Image: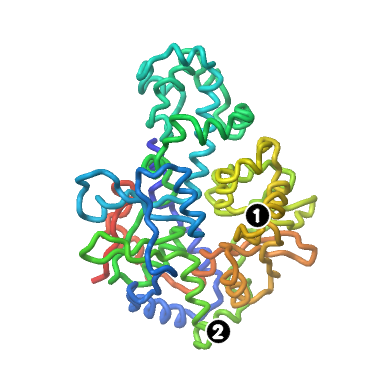
Amino acid sequence: MDQSKENAEFPSCDAYFEAIQSKKKLPLSLQESLTAAFAQIPVSSFPEVPTGRVIEIPGDTSVLEAVRILSEHNIRAAPVLNPEPGALADWQGRYLGVIDYSAIILWVLENAELASIALSAGSATAAGVGMGAVGAVGVAALGAIGPAAVAGLTAAAVGAAVAGGLTAEKGVAKDGLAAADHLGEDFYKILLEQEPFKSTTVHSIVESYRWSPFVPITLDSSMLTVLLLLSKYRLRNVPVIEPDKPVIKNFITQTGVVKGLQQCKGRDWFDYISALPLSDLGLPFMSIDEVITVKSDDLILEAFKCMKDNKIGGVPVVEGPQRKLVGSVSIRDIRFLLLRPDLFSNFRQLTVIEFMKTLGSTLPDSGNDCLVKPPPTCAPDTSLGSVIDSIASRITHRIYVVDGDLEVVGVVTLRDVISCFIHEPPGYCDIYLASANIGEAGGRSQISGES
């Protein structure tokens, strides 16, 4: 299956959303009233991004430069502009998708594998293989589907690997962690300084590693649609465009919505819902056995792979058989490995706790308190309002539910918080998304205003 299509389609989220809705101890009349109210609020009323301008990244930007841009602006994702001259004037021609840290992690792990296979073939063999000697057949033999293969790895690197008999079955295991270890100290040199990896562009990343659909909505859409996309459908962000202009005017994120809800203090409906304990709202959604954690002595690359495999944005770091919480790692922390490789020359043996301590001692202004301080936590009987205050006041997408001994017993995400305030009208998403043709063209469909 084509990876971009597989990653871009909407997942089936009915089970999650139905479970959350069924556990909420809220009067149905209140839920229906709130839903009707959100359906009447236009997207145009939502506050603009803090800078007043959405940061966009040209598709021909290198991966490393894109990481720098995301880091400098302290954002997790950005729309990608089509660099091709003569592109269509509509939004589908102007934008390729969204680049975020999750896509970059996929790229790092897969291309560590490809680079390792190529390096294993030996420079002498590589020198004897000309450009295009292998082509698509060689790529298929290696199982290479990433952007590096498209960008030029089919020339010398993959060519050398195939010529040397290093097929997917005989060569390095198809696992980014094992491959990174195989590369040893050459990992950064190859990935960041050597071709074709060095020249891999954001364009190829977006095409091959799209984590979720690129779904712009128009200014005249309703906030109910946005809330459902950010909760039920797990989108982390929703680009907003003008009805007749292919330009992104706003970028609504889960964080922005939760901060907006926080500002509703004093309104009866918000005060009523926010005063309820988490258990009355069906939270935490996952049971203690379902919470995904990493141990403090696990390798940091294993933590990133865990996030990649489970499509989650962060994991709690625990110690001991009781899973005592000692920290957390976010998917955006991959930027430190790419931007400051001098700090992590021994990254192959770098554990999660060493990673956090190194950043805490050398990058005190990193902007991520969770790396050097305990992450935000709450008790199982904490009110939703307290959770919202804690999440909104820090750069985090989740709060961990712990018992008296700091054992992790659950997690509450931004998605969970948003789900507490909305109720889906019967068939709303099925009818609406079908009318917007979501899922076609890799999920790059526009959601326009309701009639």
Instruction: Count up the numbered dots.
Output: 2
Foreground: 95 or 271? 95
- Residue 440: numbered disc: none
The residue labelled by disc 1 is: 363
Residue at x 32% of width, y 75% of height: 42
- Precedes in sequence: disc 1 or disc 2: 2
Foreground: 240 or 433? 240
Q: Image quadrant of residue 78?
A: bottom left
Check disc 1 and report its element: helix, strand or loop.
loop
Q: Is residue 407 left or right of residue 274?
A: right
Mark 2: give few (<14), some (14-19) or many (20+) Cα within 10 Å.
few
Residue at x 54% of width, y 32% of height: 112
Residues at marks 1 and 2 touching, judged by CB atoms closer than 8 Å: no
Residue 362: x %, y % from top left: 68, 52
Amino acid carrying mark 2 in the image? Tyr
Q: Is residue 87 left or right of residue 363?
A: left
- Residue 272: numbered disc: 2
Whole-angstrom CA distance, mark 1 to mark 2, is: 41 Å
Residue 100: x %, y % from top left: 46, 51
Residue 147: x %, y % from top left: 41, 35
Quadrant where the C terminus sits is bottom left
Check the image and report above or below for 134 versus 215. above
Check disc 2 and report its element: helix, strand or loop.
helix
Amino acid carrying mark 1 in the image? Leu
Check the image and report above or below for 254 versus 180. below
